[in-house]
Image: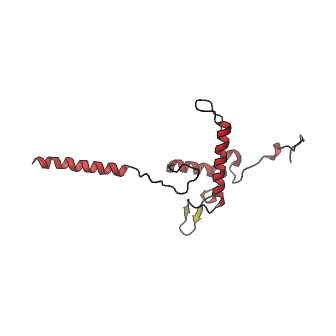
Amino acid sequence: MKNFRKTPLIIASIIFIIAGLAAVEPTQHKFKNLKVLPKNISEDSLDKIMDGFKAALGVKCGYCHLRNDSTKKFDFASDVKPEKETARKMMLMTKGINKKYFNYGEGKDMPRTITCITCHRGNPLPLIDTTSIKKPGDNKTFK
């Protein structure tokens, strides 16, 4: 009779252990071909970054990512489109500028740093304001 009393406790313990093991996230990386962003980035963080790119450049996913017309799905790991490599270079450039010119350390007031929107302002290619560019040795601006 004593064994029958322990059986529900043993079964409950086994179920608890199995449920705990199933809840543990695998250590495999979810995303493929990340070269600039962290390989262990969360899906939520990656989505926010990509949404920021789309807003800053006024584009959709297909601007940088290859879309399979038959499945209507994106191959996010593909490097076929040159815009994706350009985006990587721009991310590294922006990171370098921010580190060099705006990294005053923790605890200090941080000025606004540059982001994609700084130059792109909702356009796929950066906008350049030529009205403030001066010719060398001349006080006149280009028109």
Residue pictured at 22% horizontal, 50% vertical: 11
Q: Is residue 46 above or below residue 111?
A: below
Asked whether residue 113 appears in the rendered view, the answer is: no
Residue pictured at 66% horizontal, 36% vertical: 102
Q: Position of residue 75 (x, y in %)?
A: 55, 62
Q: How many numbered tags mark residues here? A: 0
Q: In front here: 70 or 31?
A: 31
Judge from the rendering whether residue 5 lies leftward or rightward of residue 133; answer left or right.
Answer: left
Residue pictured at 82% horizontal, 44% vertical: 133
Q: In front here: 34 or 112?
A: 34
Residue pictured at 52% horizontal, 57% vertical: 32
Q: Is residue 65 above or below residue 106?
A: below
Q: Position of residue 113 (x, y in %)?
A: 65, 39
Q: Position of residue 81 (x, y in %)?
A: 64, 61
Judge from the rendering whether residue 76 lies leftward or rightward of residue 130; answer left or right.
Answer: left
How is this picture coloured?
A: secondary structure
Asked whether residue 94 appears in the rendered view, the answer is: yes
Q: Position of residue 100 (x, y in %)?
A: 67, 39
Spot the residue most to the left: 1
Quarter occupied by residue 97? top right
Quarter occupied by residue 28? bottom left
Spot the residue most to the bottom: 70
Q: Is residue 97 above or below residue 123?
A: above
